[in-house]
Image (spheres, grey):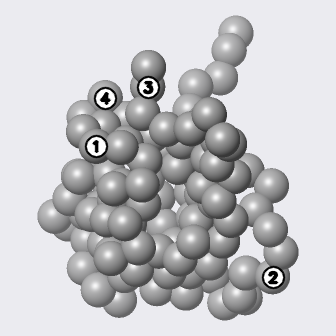
Amino acid sequence: MVSFLRNVAFDCADPYALATFWADVIGHPVHPGCSPGDAEVVIEPEGGPRWYFQAVPEPKTLKNRVHVCLRPGDRDRDAEIDRLLALGATLADDRREPDGTGWAVLQDPAGNEFCMTRPQS
């Protein structure tokens, strides 16, 4: 027997607002049955994984031990980082190597870390 990924889960203060940010990042809409003020909000891209956002009372306090790593689909790394910054992400660290490899660590509006790598070669 094996386990399968059900969803990527985010604890946050405002599930709809954070889901809207991530919907813009990944290019898939928030589920139409979800509304502002909901305690649980989902994004369900065809082919998965499902993105799940739930309201919790406590704030984020430490670095994530598990995080999302993304790669740009139709532009270079820096152009995608600029797009994400315009959506409300913040740049926490840029691990660019002289040869163009490396990654950037960003934070979503709730402070959750995620990475942007270079495009697939």
Rendered residue at 33%/56% (across/down): 79
The image position of residue 103, as x and y in percent, is 61, 47
**Is 11 drawn above or below residue 58 in the view shown?**
above
Alpha carbon of mark 4 to alpha carbon of mark 1: how far? 22 Å
Upstream in sequence: badge 2 or badge 4: 4
Name the image quarter holding the C terminus.
top left
Question: Disc 3 residue type?
Answer: Gln
Kindly state the secondary structure of the residue where label 1 is placed: loop
Dot 4: few (<14), some (14–19), or many (≥20) neighbours within 10 Å?
Answer: few
**Residue nearest the observer in this picture, 106 or 59:** 106
Q: Which residue is mark 3?
A: 120
Question: Disc 4 residue type?
Answer: Gly
The image position of residue 59, as x and y in percent, is 71, 88
Q: Which residue is mark 2?
A: 61
Alpha carbon of mark 3 to alpha carbon of mark 4: how far? 19 Å
In the picture, measured across the screen, residue 32 lies left or right of residue 74, that is left
Question: Disc 1 residue type?
Answer: Arg
Q: Which residue is mark 1?
A: 75
For marks 1 and 2, give the one nearer the viewer.
1
